[in-house]
């Protein structure tokens, strides 16, 4: 399945434009990480992928058909979105929460099959023991897994996650990302996630999209192509050293640039 | 020395197999059905009991046989038949309908707004209805006139806040907070206007307006029941059909949208249903508070937040609760009838507090 952005501009009502002329193609299964500093439009970008937001101009297409022309139900069988999790009033137990992911397919008499699918997903995420627990009783890491399970229950071809590793300790971060990486390859899915941890992204992603101010795509490519000290300096305003870690780039952070230096850098250089 | 690791290993969770999970889930669902059935049986028993209690002494089983005799047209004792059928039954039937309808309305509002404090009145329904009724009572102005002047006014005015919310929601984004706040804004406006009217009212009208605002089942007769019944029945069925979708709203608006559900639209549709249902009820009974707020919470403590079960459970529990409250109101200081709205708050308040303190779960 090919997801393509063509000259996409987006701005929230009465506010400055967030995305500028985004051109992007994601057409191979695997794990794609979107990185970039705060407020650069990463969440806005992923929300344009599944009609949560509709671009002001330009086109977002799935296999050459515009995303805005899909109805929500149809779209929900192709893409699924795992929002940044939070505690909710009136949460359900884990089975019922994951069963929600079956909603796009639900029909009378499909309960047994849905339960079978849900069990398979819980098992693959090693959380069958949580099945009967209430969602709100779980820890942050468990929330994340349950949310991912719900996303998977939709059997999407494209799974989109908004910072799935926020609030997780390093071990759980790595476990969640390893899981996503393996799933993308085993099931031939396209998984797109926003990440703030560059080293984790560099280690596990098949492809990295770097976003930079003012809401543009700075670079797209494999980790060793895009994770460079020039990129970190320009996009994040940080000095660093990039070393090799088992064939993957690894960043050792140095000092932060001053505001004036960042300003000068952005003024004198244009993105490649 | 015993290492903490050993302990950790002992508590590592074992995989649950599929059959076991199905069994556990089956039992979990089964318990919810049991609760609903218990509530329905409770409603039937309490309703039966309520027909026997009153100044005119009629036994428990006798009451049922009088009702059955009346239905089949072979009335034996005209007096008893009158007491049961005309004096007590409308009150009880109205209690069942109003209790069920208001509790379902509350459950739906709380689920769609994801706010435990939401109830049918948060949308300004009560304030609108109060104002409509007060206009009819104090100023003598009504839209229809005749016997149903107050009812018609209350109904029409209670829908105004909903119209305002719909308008605000289409201009702005229909988020739960916007809806609740616009409901509150309309509520304050109507309350202020009601107060002004009452300041200028004579004492009889004032007493009537006040009693309307506390809520009573005493004003309902057989003629008004079909209207209440039809609105409530259709409303409850519609919400039950939507229940599965309402569950999806717990995953957040964006989550719901990516599951194929337009959260804003669903919220407005359920709000419209709730408003019509609650308006049809409060127009006849006056403002009966607390049922819509408390009954769903009590049911949640027993069966959780799954709307597929919460809606019928709230309906049955609300019915039991309201008939019981009315029964207590009629008998506790006999001869004087305590308004049911007052009793619901007197029982409901402590009951909710007790359950909040007792419940083991720390989450909703």
Image (cartoon, coloured by chain):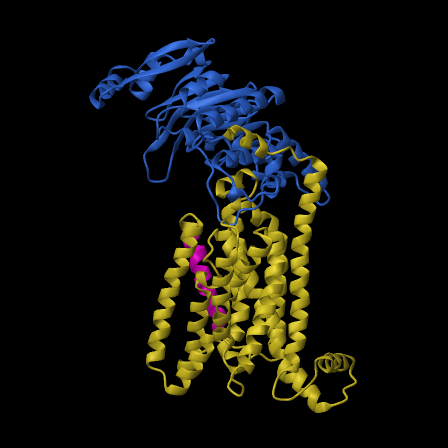
Front in this rendered view, residue A93 or B128: A93
Q: The blue chain is which one?
A: A
Most extreme residue toward the front, as rendered?
B1
- Residue appearing at x 45%, y 20% in the figure: A201
Image vertical order of residue B242 relative to residue B5, above or below: below
Most extreme residue toward the left, as rendered?
A260
Q: Residue B315 at what x, y percent from top left?
A: 60, 63
- Residue appearing at x 68%, y 85% in the figure: B58
* Residue A178 in sight: yes
- Residue appearing at x 67%, y 50% in the figure: B29
Q: In this view, does A134 lie to the left or right of A266?
A: right
Q: Residue B208 at what x, y percent from top left?
A: 44, 82
Splitting the image into 4 quarters, where does residue B303 fall? bottom right
Front in this rendered view, residue B150 or A233: A233
Splitting the image into 4 quarters, where does residue B21 fall? top right
Q: Is residue B83 left or right of residue A238?
A: right
Is residue A179 magenta-colored? Answer: no
The magenta segment is B153-169
Number of labels in the image equals 0
Q: Residue B159 at what x, y percent from top left?
A: 48, 65
Front in this rendered view, residue B116 or A41: B116
Is residue B162 magenta-colored? Answer: yes
Q: In this view, does A213 lie to the left or right of B94?
A: left
**What secondary structure predominates along the stretch shown in magenta?**
helix
Image vertical order of residue B191 relative to residue A76, above or below: below
């Amino acid at each position: 399945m090919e997801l393509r952005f063509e000259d996409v501009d987006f701005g929230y009502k009465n506010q400055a434009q967030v995305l500028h002329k985004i051109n992007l193609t994601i057409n191979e299964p695997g794990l794609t990480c979107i990185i970039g500093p705060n407020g650069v439009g990463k969440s806005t970008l992923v929300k344009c992928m599944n009609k949560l937001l509709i671009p002001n101009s330009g086109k977002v297409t799935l296999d050459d058909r515009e995303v805005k022309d899909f109805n929500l139900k149809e779209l929900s069988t192709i893409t699924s979105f795992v929002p940044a999790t939070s505690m909710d009033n009136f949460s359900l137990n884990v089975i019922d929460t994951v069963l929600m992911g079956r909603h796009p397919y639900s029909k009378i008499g499909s309960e047994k099959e849905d339960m079978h699918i849900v069990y398979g997903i819980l098992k693959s995420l090693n959380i069958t023991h949580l099945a009967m627990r209430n969602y709100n009783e779980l820890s942050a890491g468990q929330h994340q897994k349950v949310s991912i399970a719900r996303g998977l229950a939709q059997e999407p071809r494209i799974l989109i996650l908004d910072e799935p590793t926020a609030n997780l300790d390093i071990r759980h971060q790595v476990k969640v990302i390893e899981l996503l990486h393996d799933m993308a390859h085993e099931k031939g899915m396209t998984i797109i996630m926003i990440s703030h941890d560059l080293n984790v992204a560099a280690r596990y992603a098949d492809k990295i999209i770097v976003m930079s101010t003012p809401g543009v795509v700075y670079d797209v490519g494999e980790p060793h192509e895009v994770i460079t000290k020039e990129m970190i300096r320009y996009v994040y305003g940080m000095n660093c050293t990039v070393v090799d870690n088992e064939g993957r780039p690894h960043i050792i952070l140095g000092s932060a640039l001053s505001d004036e230096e960042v300003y000068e850098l952005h003024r004198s250089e244009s993105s490649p | 020395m015993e290492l903490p690791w050993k302990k950790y290993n002992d508590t590592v969770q074992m995989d649950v197999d599929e059959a076991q999970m199905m069994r556990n889930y089956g039992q979990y669902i089964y318990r919810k059905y049991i609760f609903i059935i218990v509530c329905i049986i409770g409603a039937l028993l309490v309703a039966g009991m309520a027909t026997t209690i009153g100044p005119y002494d009629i036994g428990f089983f006798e009451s049922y046989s009088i009702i059955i005799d009346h239905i089949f047209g072979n009335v034996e004792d005209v007096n008893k038949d009158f007491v049961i059928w005309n004096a007590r039954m409308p009150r009880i039937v109205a209690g069942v309908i109003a209790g069920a309808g208001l509790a379902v309305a509350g459950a739906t509002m709380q689920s769609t707004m994801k706010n435990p404090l939401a109830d049918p009145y948060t949308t300004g329904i009560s304030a609108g209805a109060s104002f409509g009724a007060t206009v009819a009572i104090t100023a003598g102005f009504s839209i229809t006139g005749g016997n149903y002047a107050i009812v018609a006014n209350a109904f029409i005015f209670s829908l105004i806040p909903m119209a305002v919310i719909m308008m605000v929601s289409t201009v702005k984004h229909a988020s739960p907070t916007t809806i609740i706040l616009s409901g509150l804004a309309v509520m304050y406006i109507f309350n202020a206007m009601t107060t002004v009217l009452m300041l200028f009212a004579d004492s009889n009208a004032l007493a009537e307006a006040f009693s309307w605002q506390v809520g009573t089942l005493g004003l309902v007769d057989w003629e008004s029941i079909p209207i209440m019944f039809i609105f409530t029945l259709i409303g409850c069925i519609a919400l039950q059909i939507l229940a599965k979708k309402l569950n999806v709203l717990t995953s957040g608006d964006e989550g719901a949208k990516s599951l194929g559900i337009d959260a804003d639209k669903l919220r407005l549709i359920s709000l419209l249903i709730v408003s019509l249902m609650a308006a049809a009820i409060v127009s006849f009974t006056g403002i009966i508070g607390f049922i819509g707020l408390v009954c769903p919470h009590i049911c949640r403590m027993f069966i959780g937040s799954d709307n597929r079960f919460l809606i019928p459970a709230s309906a049955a529990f609300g019915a039991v609760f309201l008939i019981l409250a009315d029964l207590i109101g009629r008998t506790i200081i006999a001869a004087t009838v305590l308004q049911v709205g007052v009793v619901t708050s007197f029982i409901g308040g402590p009951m909710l507090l007790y359950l909040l303190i007792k419940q083991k779960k720390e989450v909703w």
